[in-house]
Image (tube, helix red, strand yellow):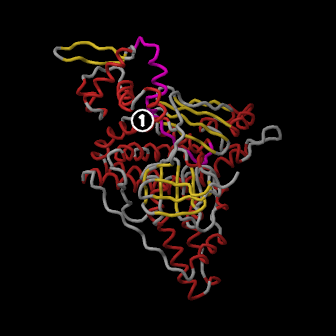
């Protein structure tokens, strides 16, 4: 029995739960019967009955205003607090992926004071929970959507300047000679680029179920694929031993990087990809229709946000290499027998610790070892960034619901059946064989080798503009995003059917534990 059914049984009817959810979600306001009917979808007769019962229980209070009777939550009732915890839907959303602390905190810092100075607005409160190599970023979706609405007129008025600043700040990242200059330039880059998230969330909320916005042009992963397919055709004629992959290695050395780690692309990896494509025909890309629910202006804006996100991802992955090198150099410089700051430990630092490392040195190694296991980090404009090493706690108001069915949002339509492979980090990619279904918290470009072998993608988090959605449409893979808990409900070896036309994952056969 799912949560909604349990509530309906507890409170007697679906209509009563609907009325309670609406009034508790707007507990400071008063509403007439007609307003309640309009916002809940409950018919007039049932609405009147439920309001009467809730008044009798003391959960609601009423007062006469003119000829109308207005209803509101009775704040003196002892039932209100527990009812809110049970009924009111949490506004918290989650974003999860493999990550180390330094790189992600650097982007968070850019979204606070620097973004405020640039746009006049900054990111809302952020709550990050690091558990070994994984991070869950909690944020309130309504606040992001509200921020997106505010940013749209600013973006449209200053679009040319914003894109110019975006490209200019990115182009300087490769020429930085030390960490302080990289730090300043990276903040400049992200303070501009952060606008894509809230604007995309706002546009996502306007789309009807099943609608999606495609990327105009080619993504950087598609461009990389083009280059590999071109070399595969050449290798069929001349032989793989005569293929020069040097230009690929120079142009795309960074394509396996992420917030978690860096990996420089090797010649053998490229040639392995070429061999797999030799003698095969490249699948045609599926082009989706433009959504009907958006105005022309919002559709254009959505495409621009997807483009900026794709370019931002490319620059982020490339910058990860230089950031890693700077941190490694600084760690080597200040290491001693007692305080050996390994490259992995340095990725758990905060920017302020690296900028003033001598100040933090005496206890830095011990602190980083604690963070390496777990940490909670919060960020807001008012309080700045706070770090709680070796502690895990979650924002208040989060309620996890166990779902009877695994459902999510359609990112790319189609159907596929196969064995589940849970991919929580890059090292799990080896599990994916041809015909498997990738189930992950989220995907990132470093999972592309595994994505090429799968027949469908299912993720816990993300919207229709996330990486999984974009890549799935490029490779024409059925894809469902935003399931919340697919990685917890499914396990390796489960035989499932992904019906991405309806956003449903059906378990056909469970693997024995």
Is-magenta flag for residue 84?
yes
Instruction: Name which quarter of the figure residue 246 lies in.
Output: bottom right
The spot of residue 112 in percent (x, y) is 46, 35
Return the residue at label 1: 122
Q: Which residue reaches farthest right? A: 337
Using a 10 Å C-alpha cutoff, classify the residue at mark 1 as few (fewer than 14 neighbours), some (14 to 19) or many (20 or more): many
| Residue under the image location 37 percent in, 47 percent down | 204
Tag 1's secondary structure?
loop
The spot of residue 329 in percent (x, y) is 69, 49
Q: Is residue 465 left or right of residue 42?
A: right
Q: Is residue 375 above or below residue 289?
A: above
| Residue under the image location 25 percent in, 51 percent down | 297
| Residue under the image location 68 percent in, 43 percent down | 346
Q: Is residue 209 left or right of residue 367?
A: left
The one nearer the camera, 40 or 26, is: 40
Q: Is residue 142 above or below residue 512?
A: above
The spot of residue 158 in percent (x, y) is 30, 46
Q: Is residue 364 left or right of residue 6?
A: right
Q: Is residue 127 left or right of residue 41?
A: right
Magenta stretch, residue numbers: 75-100
């Amino acid at each position: 029995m799912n949560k909604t059914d349990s509530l309906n049984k507890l409170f007697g009817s679906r209509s009563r739960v609907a009325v309670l959810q609406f009034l508790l979600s707007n507990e400071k306001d008063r509403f007439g019967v007609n307003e309640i009917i309009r916002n809940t979808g409950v018919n007039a007769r049932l609405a009147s009955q439920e309001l009467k019962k809730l008044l009798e229980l003391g959960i609601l209070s009423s007062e006469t205003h003119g000829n109308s009777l207005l209803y509101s939550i009775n704040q003196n009732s002892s039932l209100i607090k527990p009812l809110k915890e049970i009924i009111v839907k949490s506004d918290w959303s989650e974003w999860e992926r493999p990550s180390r602390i330094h790189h992600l905190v650097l982007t968070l810092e850019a979204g606070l004071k620097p973004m405020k100075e640039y746009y006049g607005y900054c990111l809302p409160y952020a709550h990050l929970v690091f558990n070994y190599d994984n991070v869950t970023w909690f944020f309130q979706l309504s606040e992001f959507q509200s921020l997106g609405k505010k940013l749209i007129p600013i973006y449209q008025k200053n679009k040319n300047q914003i894109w110019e600043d975006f490209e200019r700040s990115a182009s300087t990242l490769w020429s930085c000679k030390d960490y302080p200059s990289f730090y300043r330039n990276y903040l400049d880059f992200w303070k501009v680029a952060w606008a894509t998230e809230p604007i995309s969330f706002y546009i996502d909320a306007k789309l009807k179920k099943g609608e999606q916005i495609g990327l105009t042009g080619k993504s950087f992963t598609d461009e990389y694929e083009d280059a590999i397919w071109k070399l595969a055709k050449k290798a069929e004629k001349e032989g793989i031993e005569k293929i020069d992959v040097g230009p690929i290695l120079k142009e795309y050395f960074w394509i396996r990087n992420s917030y978690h780690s860096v990996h420089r692309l090797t010649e053998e990896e490229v040639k392995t990809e070429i061999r797999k494509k030799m003698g095969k025909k490249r699948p045609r890309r599926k082009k989706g229709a433009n959504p009907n629910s958006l105005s022309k202006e919002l559709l254009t804006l959505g495409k621009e946000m997807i483009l900026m996100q794709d370019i931002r991802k490319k620059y982020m992955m490339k910058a990860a290499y230089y950031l890693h090198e700077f941190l490694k150099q600084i760690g080597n410089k200040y290491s001693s027998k007692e305080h050996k700051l390994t490259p992995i430990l340095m990725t758990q630092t905060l920017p302020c610790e690296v900028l003033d490392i001598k100040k933090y040195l005496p206890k830095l190694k011990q602190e980083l070892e604690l963070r390496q296991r777990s940490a909670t980090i919060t960020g807001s404009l008012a309080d700045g960034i706070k770090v709680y090493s070796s502690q895990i706690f979650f924002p208040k108001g989060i309620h996890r619901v166990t779902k009877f069915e695994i459902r999510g949002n359609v990112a790319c339509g189609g159907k596929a059946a196969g064995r589940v492979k849970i991919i929580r980090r890059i090292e799990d990619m080896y599990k994916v064989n041809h015909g498997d279904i990738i189930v992950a918290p989220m995907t990132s470009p470093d999972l592309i080798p595994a994505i090429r072998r799968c027949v469908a993608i299912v993720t816990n988090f993300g919207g229709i503009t996330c990486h999984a959605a974009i890549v799935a449409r490029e490779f024409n893979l059925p894809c469902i995003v935003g399931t919340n808990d697919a990685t917890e409900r499914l396990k390796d070896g489960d035989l499932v059917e992904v019906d991405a036309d309806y956003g449903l994952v059906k378990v056909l056969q469970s693997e024995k534990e």
